[in-house]
Image (cartoon, rainbow, N blue to C red):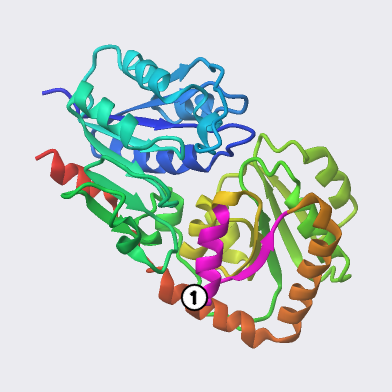
């Protein structure tokens, strides 16, 4: 009997970021450990992660970029790299007549039209990973790993009857290091080490903004781990900023990010996959939205007392945001009890162990 085939449709790029593909890679690692084969179908955008997918031991099919007419009603259409009908056709051709058991779509440009067509053509069961709740899906299982306080109710009119909806950050696919590295269980509120990371790309250089804010406080006693993705376009600028600062360690696409988070007392970052990882490690965070799709999750987490919402990045507000970060840091340094409270709330909102969606797939194959 041949191994079950799981096909992923997800993209990474310099404008999308890397989060969608990275969490699918975490998912695929869990599935491969159970004897399943994983195929990634990705559009060959600039900054795609095809080499990383192949290095992880999975098959990858890269689709050619195609022009997409911009439609105001479909804000993420450009992310797909083709109109939706063309993407469906490209995806089915990439399967090369193979019939996947499951198709997993993690893409803000994919909706019920894509899912219905692919399900009809392949007879595969469809899983959608989506935290926006801004469009309808035709899937068998929907995973919403966001921090929304509305839970499954936000999907009531967006999925078909019979769809299994699982919501909450404990359903987020997590890399093995985040499942196996012990989380911090207690904090004294003293900031000795700060973890700064704004995802795999960080085109607006929010990392530099955060670092400048910290340096303005003149606290060389606070160690800093500054984490960049391999495709960060601001690496040279950040290296110059950190030069001569003995308390700052710059990490480029490092192994062991979970360990860095576990040793930190505070994070400064954005939304997306890394936010869930930080919460899994029990790490309080100052959060700045650098993309529109990050704002709802950040606001929901902050509203529940699990993080500090710094607002939305805007280039014209860069100086004001720098000062806001510095002021917020100074406030936390002066009031350790506030950081203790954040950590306690994160522990309540994010269970110490994630739910394995791979278990749901494995049961579905029986």
Picture quadrant of residue 196: bottom right
Picture quadrant of residue 69: top right
The stretch drawn in magenta includes residue 302 = yes
Residue 84: image x %, image y %? 42, 25
Side of 266 relative to 98 (left or right): right
Determine the secondary structure under disc 1: loop
Relative to 40, does residue 22 appear above or below in the rendering?
A: below
Residue 326: image x %, image y %? 80, 70
Q: Report the front residue among 171 and 123.
A: 123
Picture quadrant of residue 317: bottom right
Which residue is pictured at 49% across the width and 32% down the height? 11
- Part of the protein shown in magenta: 294-313
Residue 95: image x %, image y %? 31, 17
Circle 1 Cα neighbour tier, 10 Å, few/some/many (<14 / 14–19 / ≥20): some
Quadrant assignment for the C terminus:
top left
Residue carrying label 1: 304
């Amino acid at each position: 009997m041949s191994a079950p085939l799981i096909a992923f449709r997800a993209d990474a790029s310099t404008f999308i970021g890397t989060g969608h593909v990275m969490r699918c890679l975490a998912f695929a690692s869990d599935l491969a450990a159970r004897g399943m084969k994983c195929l990634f179908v990705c559009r060959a955008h600039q900054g795609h992660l095809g080499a990383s997918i192949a290095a992880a031991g999975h098959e990858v099919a890269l689709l050619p970029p195609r022009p997409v007419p911009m439609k105001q009603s479909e804000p993420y259409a450009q992310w797909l790299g083709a109109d939706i009908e063309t993407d469906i056709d490209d995806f089915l051709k990439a399967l090369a007549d193979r019939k996947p058991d499951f198709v997993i779509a993690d893409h803000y440009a994919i909706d019920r039209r894509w899912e219905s067509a692919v399900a009809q053509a392949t007879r595969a069961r469809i899983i959608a990973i989506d935290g926006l709740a801004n469009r309808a899906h035709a899937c068998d299982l929907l995973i919403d790993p966001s921090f929304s306080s509305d839970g499954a109710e936000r999907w009531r009119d967006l999925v078909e009857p019979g769809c299994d909806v699982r919501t909450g950050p404990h359903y987020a696919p997590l890399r093995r290091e985040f499942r196996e590295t012990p989380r911090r269980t207690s904090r004294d509120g003293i900031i000795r080490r700060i973890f700064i990371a704004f995802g795999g790309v960080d085109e607006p250089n929010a990392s530099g903004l955060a670092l400048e804010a910290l340096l303005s406080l003149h606290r060389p006693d606070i160690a800093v781990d500054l984490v960049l993705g391999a495709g960060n376009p601001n690496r040279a600028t950040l290296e110059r900023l950190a030069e001569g600062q003995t308390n700052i360690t710059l990490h480029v696409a490092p192994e062991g990010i979970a360990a860095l988070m576990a040793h930190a007392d505070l994070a400064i970052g954005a939304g997306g996959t890394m936010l869930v990882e930080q919460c899994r490690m029990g790490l309080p965070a100052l959060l700045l939205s650098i993309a529109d799709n990050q704002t709802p999750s950040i606001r929901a987490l902050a509203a529940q007392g699990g993080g500090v919402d710094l607002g939305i990045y805007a280039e014209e507000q860069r100086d004001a945001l720098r000062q806001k970060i510095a002021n917020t840091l100074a406030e936390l340094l002066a009031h350790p009890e506030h950081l203790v409270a954040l950590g306690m709330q994160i522990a309540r909102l994010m269970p110490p162990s994630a739910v394995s969606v791979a278990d749901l797939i494995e049961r579905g194959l029986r």
